[in-house]
Image: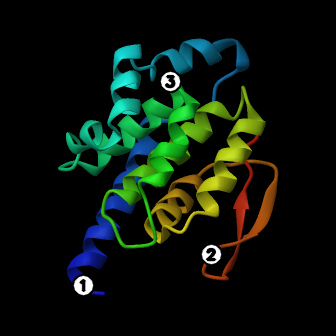
Amino acid sequence: MSSKYSIGKAVYVLAGCLALASGVSSTSAANSSARLAAYQLSDSVITEFKKNPEAVLKGYESSALLLSDQVRNLIVSDSGTAPTLIGLCGPQPNPRCGPIGAGIAEAITLIAPDDPKLSADLQAVVLNSKSKDMVTAYLAVFSNVQTTQTTRIRLPSGQVVTIPLPVSP
């Protein structure tokens, strides 16, 4: 692995952490729909993404933070977009997989108070994926979330890590 790739990967992970710090906060259930409405995309954007995910994401290649935000917004708007986003990241290093992982972590944080089961299901899919870049960014962003419960999981690499569960505070 070249040092250029390592620096690039660190930039994407850091961008994901900054995105979480700048935009995600927990609120009461009464404010939930208003909070989530701020992240909703139009039906036409969701439809276009489902037709051609690669084309929609190409517009965000120059900014990890914008890509992370778009991934978050896609999943908050339609959780059915998550499998496609996760599927875009394979085991090979890919610079966009970090922002995708960060965006998924942000979405899970936003969705958890309303739908803990969906949040837990999405988390399991991400953590069992073959993309080290996506899992690394996901863990970097999600490790900032304070919860009362944790779980230990085994990553595809065999490493066991303790992570917070996405539950309502």
Most foreground residue, 92 or 123: 92
78 sits left or right of 46 in the view: right
Q: Pick the residue in front: 162 or 101.
A: 101
Secondary structure beneath label 2: loop
**Left or right for 166, reference 22:** right
User: Which residue appears at 26% of the width and 76% of the height?
Assistant: 5
Q: Which residue is mark 3?
A: 77
Q: Mark 3, residues whose alpha carbon is within 10 Å: few (<14), some, or many (≥20)?
A: many
Q: Nearer the viewer, residue 83 or 151?
A: 83
Q: Position of residue 109 (x, y in %)?
A: 61, 39
Residue under the point 58% across and 53% down = 142
| Disc 3/disc 2 C-alpha distance (Å) | 29 Å
Q: CA distance from mark 3 to mark 1?
A: 37 Å
N-term-proximal mark, 3 vs 1: 1
What residue did someone put label 1 on? 3
> Splitting the image into 4 quarters, where does residue 79 fall?
top right
The answer to whether the residues at label 1 and label 2 have Cβ atoms under 8 Å apart is no
Q: Nearer the viewer, mark 3 or mark 1?
A: 3
| 26 with respect to 165 (left or right) | left
Q: Identify the amino acid type marked 2.
A: Pro
**Quadrant of image for the N terminus:** bottom left
Marks 3 & 1, CB-CB < 8 Å contact = no
* Three-letter amino acid code at the position of disc 1: Ser
Question: x, y (%) of residue 76?
Answer: 53, 28
Q: Position of residue 128 (x, y in %)?
A: 64, 64
Distance in Å between CA atoms under marks 1 and 2: 24 Å
Q: Is residue 27 above or below residue 19?
A: above
Can you identify the residue that label 2 sits on?
156
Sequence-wise first label, 1 or 2: 1
Residue 118 seen:
yes
